[in-house]
Amino acid sequence: MGRTERQEKKGGRIRRLFTWKKLLGTFFVGCLLLMGAFYVIYLMVPVPTANAQATMQSNVYKYANGKILARTGEINREIVGLEKIPRDVQDAFVAAENKTFYKDNGVDIKGTARGALNTVTGKGKQGGSTITQQYVKNYYLDQDQTVTRKLKEMVIALKVDQRMAKSEILAGYINTSYYGRSAYGIQAAAQSYYGVDASKLNVAQGAYLASLLQAPNQYDWTAASATGRKLVEERWNYTLDNMVEEGWLDPAKRAGLTFPVPQKPKAAPGMEGQRGYLVEAANQELMRQGLREEDIRAGGWTITLNIDEKKQNALVAAVERQLEAKLDRKGDEKDATVQAGATSVDPKTGKVLALYGGVGATEHWTSNATRRDYQPASTFKPIVLASALENDAKTQDGRRIGLGTIYDGTSRRPVEGSDVPFAPENEDDRRYGPVTVQKATNSSINSVYAQMIVDVGPGNVKKTALDLGMKDGPDFGESPAMSLGTMGASTWDMAAVYATLDNHGVKVTPTIVKSAQHKDRRADPVKPIGAQVISRETADTVTKAMTGVVRSGSGFRAAGDYHAAGKTGTSENNRSAWFVGYTPELVTAVGLFGEDIKGNQVTLTDTINEGRANGGRTPAQIWGDYTTRALGGGSDARFDLETDGSAVTEPDAPAPTGTTTGSPDPTAPATPTGSPDPTPPPTPTTTTPPQPTGTITIPPPPTETTDPTEPTGPPVDPPVGGEGERDDRRRAGQ
């Protein structure tokens, strides 16, 4: 027998084995077996009692010392009958989630199979469940994404659909779903998002709440990113279009609907004072670490914070003494616009030891400690200096930038070497003439730092800022104006930056959560200490520069029985005022923000004091008050600095003059532009004739032994020029 004949014979046997009849029979037998198996499962799987969500546990939040700070987690839910929910709102939920709800048997076989496949292959959450299936998951089962749970969901959904009316299932689904903002059920959601009962919702609002269910945290309009807002608006339109398609909404009415922007969130009861801010900061950190909001709200967590109870109380008391006690919030509309925020961090561990979010979480829900919608102003200038040192930057005529480098401090001097014109005005239009970088830091001279940022390169400065801990955003452009801190930043962000400087250039990421444990799992904490992001010499030289700000510069009110470095800042139009500083043991950022009742930014001028609310005034006083008490009255700890060792000498220049127009009376308020604060005169130093180019680095005299950033005596009264200081002299009768 030849080879060909053997192959033909073998092929014939295979064809006889796999005939169409045999294949079809095998298929039907397989289907019958699967159906039989499913029927057995159907008989064996009962409809269980309600799951643990019906009796949710509280979350317990503790101070670092173990004392309970707050308990949360009681379900914010009020069951309402379907008859109290407008019919078009009911239809919106069906249109958003399951158009065939009234016709199907409670199960979407294709959607369930797709969800199971996604689960097995690790492609994330399933899609395509019916309203009945989602109700079963919410009420009877848990949220685990497993094949077993999906199979149980399908079986129970079939039984529930047979035993319950569609209206009962829809009511259960709407009342058990989670909508974000700690709201379970449509009644709580209606109150939280629109301030009305569910019975008063209109179809546009109902469509938004129905759209929320897909991603409550991501789709909350007031907290959503630009992408989140776009997605939820698309989901809202999809829902309404489905209603028109199903004949549940008149096309003409649909055409006239506009997106119903929800109200700002309000704190849940029991979150009064600082507790609400602390709890929310902890929750947000846990979510950044990957824990879902639904998991947190479901309860059962014991969350221990890094917050030091004594330091927390000291910070609240400092704000009360230095700010709140001096304001008339109820009787003065201007005083009512003042908001304060603060974040205090241990630079060695990254622990957030204290946080001040505002007057109270139930009165002002937005945390002033973590908001990023105000400018950090001149507290950004040390970052410019750090970038200059780290990048070995040079002036336009080739001299390396250091603390002794001389710049032209003339107000409104156009920057050189920039494609973007910029000529910032110094406070009160002061003309300083030739000054060192140290003096420019002490007195926060805008013209010097505007030129420095051009010398370094705005792109390099932004990179340094991000490396140190600031956050990028659409308002963080690369231009000479960056030197004035024109981007948005929070006290949390600036505390991170300054903690990294205090930690000799090793990255510090503030963390408020010490541990988060559940009965069967735990959340991973933030890694607070990272890599060396700038050299130790750079960080320590910037610290050295900022000791001069506290000892003999604009931050002199922050001085106390401790060694400190820091920087003041006052933004354009006096909308924010800052002091960010540190000792070897503690970093604290304090900010004041002007905000009217509608949430608009307004000026702080003529609020806490007559005239300008400078960063070197109330913020520095809050900082000093808190730091003194947080350190037990003071500290002997000293900065361990490794700098280039060069001393700084000031050129022989005339005292700064101003050109502010108006009354010659030195006590008359002026309208400054820019961001520096009034400063006391520095301690006299060895003088050197001014250099003709204005950018020469003056070498130290051979016998120089005194660090001019450490004055020989206490700060003296500053020269006339800053509104806050003029007010002091007026009260003293000078």
Image (spheres, grey):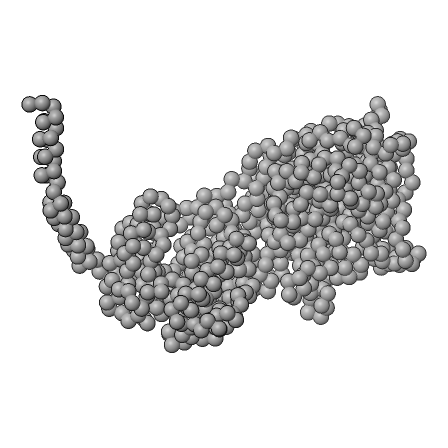
Q: Position of residue 585 (x, y in %)?
A: 63, 40
Q: Nearer the viewer, residue 492 or 185?
A: 185
Left or right of residue 259, residue 119 in this image: left
Extreme residue toward the left, this view = 1
The answer to whether residue 417 is seen in the rendering is yes
Q: Which quadrant is home to the C terminus?
A: bottom right
Q: Position of residue 439 (x, y in %)?
A: 81, 39
Extreme residue toward the right, this view = 664
Please give the name of the residue rendered at 27% of the width and 56% of the height, measured from the top-left corner: 109
Dividing the picture into quadrants, the one containing residue 178 is bottom left
Q: Position of residue 289 (x, y in %)?
A: 48, 46
Extreme residue toward the bottom, this view = 83
The answer to whether residue 191 is seen in the rendering is no
Q: Which quadrant is home to the N terminus?
A: top left
Q: Nearer the viewer, residue 525 or 203?
A: 203
Please give the name of the residue rendered at 71% of the width and 32% of the height, measured from the top-left corner: 389
Left or right of residue 606, residue 15 in this image: left
166 is higher (above) or lower (below) than 36:
below
Left or right of residue 429, residue 245 in this image: left
Q: Nearer the viewer, residue 46 or 57?
A: 46
Q: Position of residue 342 (x, y in %)?
A: 64, 51
Please give the name of the residue rendered at 61% of the width and 38% of the height, measured from the top-left corner: 467
Please give the name of the residue rendered at 19% of the width and 58% of the height, measured from the top-left corner: 42
337 is higher (above) or lower (below) than 422:
below
Dividing the picture into quadrants, the one containing residue 80 is bottom left
Q: Nearer the viewer, residue 336 or 691?
A: 691
